[in-house]
Structure formats: C-alpha cells, structure tokens
Image (tube, grey):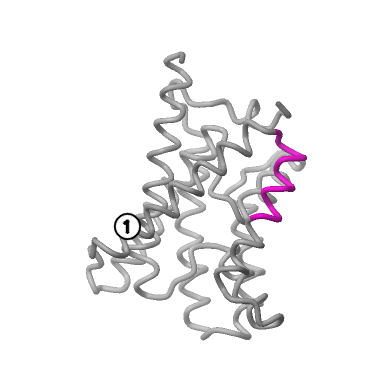
Amino acid sequence: MSKRVLVSYTLIFSGAILQGLAMSLFLFPHNIPSGGAAGLAILINHWLQLPLGLALWFVNFAFLVLALKYFGYTWTIRTMLSVTITSVTVSLASEHMELSTNYFWVDLLSGGIIFGIGVGLLIRNGASSGGMVIPALMIAKMKGTSPGRVMLWINFFIFLLTATVIDWTIVIFAILCQTISTNIIDFIYHFKIPYTYSTELGWRKK
C-alpha cells in the first residue's frame, strides 16, 4: 500500500470518528439533527409509520445505490466504510462517553465545527458521510460549485419540511449547525492537504 493511499484511509478513519463524536457528544444530547438524512427519516416515519431506524437505513441505502451508479465502486466502498465507522463511534460514545458541556451554544458551536471537519476530511479523501452529501456532491460537480454550500440548501429545505413534525426551534438550531459545519467543509474542500485523495478521482467510475 502506497503512502498516499495509507494517509488517505487514515484521514477517512479520522473524519468518520470526528463526525460520530460530534453527533453523539454535542448534537444529539440537545436533539439537534446532524443532517438532512435524519430529517428525511423523520418524515418517512411520520408519513409511512416506518420505524426511525429502518427509515434512516432506507434513505442511506437509496443514496448509496445512486452513488454506486454515479461515482463508482471505489467511492461507494469508501463511503460505506465511513458510515460504518461513524455508526460504531456513535454507539460507543453514546454508551461510554459524556462530554456535553450542558451549555447549549458551546455544544452547538463545538458540534458544528467538529462535524464539519469530519465531513470535510471524508469528502477530500474520496468518501462521504452518506445521506445528503451524495446528491450535494453530484450537484456541486455538475454546477462547478462547493459541495458544502449545496448541502446547506438541500438540508435547509428538508429541515423546513421536518418543522411540521418536530419543534420549530430545533429546526432553527439545526440550520445554524449546518451553516457552521458547511463553512468548515468548504474551507477543508479548498485547502491544500498533502497526500489527500483527489476529489476528481473520487468522482470517476472505477
């Protein structure tokens, strides 16, 4: 395994862990949705009465199938790896760790920044966190714009829809969190990181 590939997978591993820690330790304790996929799961649960866990799996599975056809096997496998690591991190951290400061705005800011760093590292290394990142990358590639900004607008629309199901204030906090994290994502997306997996390569079918 080359040094470049080793560094790339190390950054994917690190990004997935950071994403999981941000959700489990800072965002979920305050019931702040981490992204649009969770919002869609809530809507599916509300409209079709599917369990939330099954609804969330369905959303991610649908986007992963789309990713396989559009981005190819390498990118999809990397994304599946990152989703798995994130899920394990969330489970372990929720059960064995408790770092929430109990100061809402501190947790919101910390969660948004750490979540953005995690997702940014994943995108820069040919992977994603699943969910809305997949269509955001597709649109960003077609329009030649930054994926973080596209993801913000997609999630904003979904959060507005979920306002019919959950409290309005939670939706507003979720949008604030997304605003913070997507700016971090865009910064990392444009920042020159040695040995990172080329985003353009991540979009080619393999």
The percent coordinates of residue 205 (x first, y second) are 73, 29
- Residue 62 lies in the magenta-colored region: yes
The residue at which mark 1 appears reads as 92
On screen, residue 100 versus residue 162, left or right, reads left
Between 105 and 85, the one nearer to me in the picture: 85
- Secondary element at tag 1: helix
Callout 1, which amino acid? Leu
Magenta range? 61-72
The percent coordinates of residue 65 (x first, y second) are 72, 48
The crowd level at tag 1 (other Cα within 10 Å; few <14, some 14-19, many 20+) is some
Quadrant the C terminus occupies:
top right
Residue 40 occupies quadrant = bottom right
Numbered circles on residues, count: 1
Between 1 and 15, the one nearer to me in the picture: 1
The percent coordinates of residue 121 (x first, y second) are 46, 39
Residue at (42, 51) in percent of width and height: 19
Between 137 and 85, the one nearer to me in the picture: 85
56 over 205 or under it: above or below: below
Residue at (60, 61) in percent of width and height: 57
Q: Main secondary structure of the magenta part?
A: helix
Residue that protrudes farthest toward the top in the picture: 2
On screen, residue 70 versus residue 166, left or right, reads right
- Residue 53 lies in the magenta-colored region: no
